């Protein structure tokens, strides 16, 4: 951990409070990777925290008591509700800190997130003796799956998120419970927390495995019925040997090199229009204008998932244009300029590569489009510097 990430806990301690790294943070430290989020469990209350950190943002409709952004990662404060007495650093009651951690660990969902880190003493604390399960790379709940589901109604989504973050194996009793409890929670009404957890899955690098789990448990049908409809879209085996439209979409997500939010949701939605256009086979073209239909669907989905207008514009651009690079040699110069000067083009190029690779096709068309793009950028730079006076390909 660097100094910037230690600053928050150290300042709390310097002001007489106790503080531990908690939940995902020590887990990622144990996995020897930089935590993507800094969680701090402390006995300081929200008013005291806000006085110490004036730039704090109180998040509405979220799971975290408070949250603010520093550098490129969020810092979440969790206020301990145990014990009521806030006394700290008094001889003979050092166990107050550990009892608070044990209480918080017992109330958490997964044993994998039940560790704490005392950055002042530079040691980990394992109040539930969960490290042996952690070493076995198993995702297990801190309580029975049935009781965990009562406390955490979105347990299936949260399990998929942990799977996407770690790649660990899900405990058999938990997996069986999730598969047999398909109506555990109604995901049709999406709140901010559900949306955030879902897109954390999409950008994790293991979206394929996590989305497969959600589908097995009936969550995709509720959360994204537009994508679930692709299961009924049979595709030409010569062009899509990977299977139906839904399987193709999951394969696309597996092929992305560097996931980001707008790219991954664009991939998730890029073929949704096929479910609406599959009955129209005019001019012997399967799914005519499906990219246009997909773009309309995408806008409706994005508003449901709390995307801002800039993100909606980018995803719409990617979805609407995901087929256009097949015709890069036939596009007029004006159309090429519009594409190549768009700030969204790098994501479009990566979507195109994933779309090709997911169907087990040669990606030579992708490399050709990339070469045309690089040549355009080179000549456009020369034109702006006054070395070229005519068209881009002169």
Image (cartoon, rainbow, N blue to C red):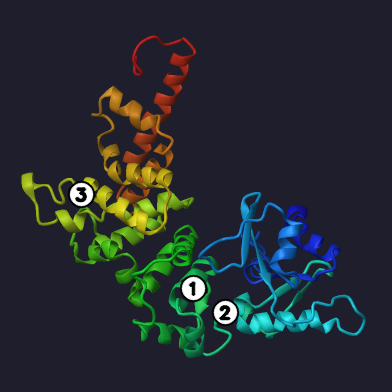
Which residue has dot 2 on it? 110
At x 49%, y 73%, the residue is 158
Q: Residue furthest front?
A: 47
Residue 2, image x, y percentages:
75, 55
The answer to whether residue 42 is above or below residue 254 is below
Secondary structure beneath dot 1 equals helix
Where residue 195 sits, quadrant-wise, is bottom left
Callout 2: few (<14), some (14-19), or many (20+) C-alpha neighbours within 10 Å? many
Q: Is residue 387 visible?
A: yes
C-alpha gap between disc 1 and disc 3: 33 Å
Total marks in image: 3
Residue 259, image x, y percentages:
47, 52
- The tag earlier along the polypeptide, 1 or 3, is 1
Residue 344, image x, y percentages:
41, 39
The answer to whether residue 276 is above or below residue 351 is below
Label 2 close to label 1 by CB (< 8 Å): yes
Which residue has dot 1 on it? 158
Which residue is nearer to you in this view: 85 or 347?
A: 85
Marking on residue 290: 3
Residue 291, image x, y percentages:
24, 47
User: For this view, does 95 lie left or right of residue 312?
Assistant: right
At x 81%, y 61%, the residue is 10
Label 3 close to label 2 by CB (< 8 Å): no
User: For this view, does 3 lie left or right of residue 108?
Assistant: right
Which residue is nearer to you in this view: 122 or 392?
A: 122
């Amino acid at each position: 951990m660097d100094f910037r990430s230690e600053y928050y806990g150290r300042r709390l301690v310097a002001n007489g409070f106790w503080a531990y790294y908690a939940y995902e943070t020590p887990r990622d430290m144990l996995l020897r990777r930089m935590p993507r989020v800094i969680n701090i469990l402390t006995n300081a209350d929200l008013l005291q925290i806000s006085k110490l950190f004036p730039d704090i943002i109180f998040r509405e409709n979220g799971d975290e008591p408070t949250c603010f952004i520093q550098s490129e990662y969020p810092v979440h404060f969790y206020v301990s509700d145990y014990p009521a007495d806030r006394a700290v650093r008094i001889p003979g009651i050092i166990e107050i800190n550990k009892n608070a951690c044990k209480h918080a660990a017992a109330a958490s969902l997964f044993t994998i997130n039940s560790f704490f880190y005392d950055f002042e003493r530079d040691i980990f604390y394992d109040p539930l003796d969960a490290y042996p399960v952690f070493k076995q790379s198993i995702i297990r709940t801190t309580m029975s799956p049935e009781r965990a589901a009562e406390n955490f109604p979105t347990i299936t989504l949260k399990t998929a998120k942990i799977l996407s973050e770690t790649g660990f194996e899900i405990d058999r009793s938990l997996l069986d419970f999730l598969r047999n409890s398909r109506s555990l929670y109604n995901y049709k009404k999406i709140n901010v927390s559900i949306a955030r957890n879902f897109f954390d899955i999409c950008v994790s690098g293991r979206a394929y495995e996590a989305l497969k789990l959600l589908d097995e448990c009936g969550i995709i049908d509720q959360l994204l019925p537009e994508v679930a409809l692709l299961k009924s879209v049979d595709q030409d085996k010569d062009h899509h040997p990977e299977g139906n439209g839904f399987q193709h979409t999951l394969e696309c997500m597996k092929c992305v090199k560097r996931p980001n939010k707008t790219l991954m949701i664009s991939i998730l939605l890029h073929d949704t229009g096929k479910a609406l256009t599959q009955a129209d086979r005019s001019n012997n073209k399967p799914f005519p204008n499906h990219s246009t239909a997909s773009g309309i669907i995408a806008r409706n989905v994005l508003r449901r998932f709390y995307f801002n207008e800039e993100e909606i514009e980018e995803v719409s651009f990617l979805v609407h244009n995901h087929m256009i690079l097949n015709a890069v040699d036939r596009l007029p110069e004006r159309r090429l300029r519009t594409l190549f000067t768009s700030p969204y083009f790098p994501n479009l190029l990566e979507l195109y590569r994933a779309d090709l690779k997911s169907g087990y096709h040669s990606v030579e068309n992708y490399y050709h489009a990339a070469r045309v793009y690089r040549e355009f950028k080179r000549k456009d730079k020369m034109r702006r510097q006054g070395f070229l006076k005519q068209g881009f390909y002169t």
